[in-house]
Image (tube, rainbow, N blue to C red):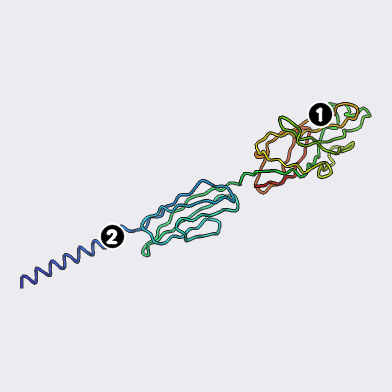
Amino acid sequence: MKFLKFNSLITASLLTTILFQFSCKKEDQKPEACFNYTHQTNANETVAFTNCSKNYSGATWSFGDGETSHTRSPEHTYQNQGTYQVTLVVDNDEKTDSYTRTLIIDSSPPIRMTLNSITITKWPETDNGNPWDTDGTTPDLFPKITNANRYLYLSTETYQNPVTGTPYLFSTTSGLPLKITNMEEQLYIEWYDLDPNKADDFMGSLGFTPLSRHVNGENTISFASSKFEFELNVTWEY
């Protein structure tokens, strides 16, 4: 009788230990969500996400742009620049855990710019009060584009005797388009008055680097100073 009672106590003790260990094991297996990502964070470039979560069997990703994935460590391409909240939810059939990080996607840097046209709306009608031409007329206006070493573009036509404030378009009939491949090169838009009998009169210039004036989704680069107002119509290639 005492032996049976003692044996029952041992059995109960073992059962309690097993239940306690099983309970602790379940508690220890609570999932912990975690992820990292590569720093290729430009639009149209692939971002690789690495899942570093623990104690999980399933994973659900929300990339913040409406797209999702159940892949353990997915790759994702963002089409547009912006700020995205990326959330990973992991589970082990018993519990879940989530982790969110903010991802900033920049616009992809362009590799080439095509200058399609130049529209000018303001220019100096006189040379510090003196006429540009000896006959007293306003300038025969035309642009040049240069870098530090040479001319890249010289207009094949002039705007004859223009009056400032009236837009004039230099485009295909002026020798455009012009392709620019060095996005960090300093360029200058120079303006001249055509003079058939001597050197052309330099009227002024404005400089820029293509990359510094790039705005994602914008195809117009505007310039304004006390003497000039004009804009470039461009096409970016990525």
At 9% from the left edge and 70% from the top edge, which residue is drawn? 5
Towards the viewer: 145 or 19 = 145
**In the image, what residue type sits under mark 2?**
Lys
The mark tally for this picture is 2
Is the C-beta separation of discs 1 and 2 under 8 Å? no
Q: Is residue 194 left or right of residue 81?
A: right
Q: CA distance from mark 1 to mark 2?
A: 84 Å
Within 10 Å of disc 2 (Cα), the crowding (few <14, some 14-19, many 20+) is few
From the top left corner, tell me how far across and down residue 129 is, in percent.
86, 26
Residue receiving disc 1 = 202
Q: Position of residue 194 (x, y in %)?
A: 87, 32
Residue in view at x 71 percent, y 30 percent: 148
Reply above or below: 145 against 35.
above
Residue in the image at 66% along x and 42% along y: 214
The quadrant where residue 223 appears: top right
186 lies left or right of 26: right
Label 1, secondary structure: give it.
strand
Mark 1 or 2 closer to N-term? 2
Q: Could you tell me residue 186's position as x and y percent?
A: 68, 33
Number of other residues with Cα within 10 Å of mark 1, as a class: few under 14, some 14 to 19, many 20 or more: some
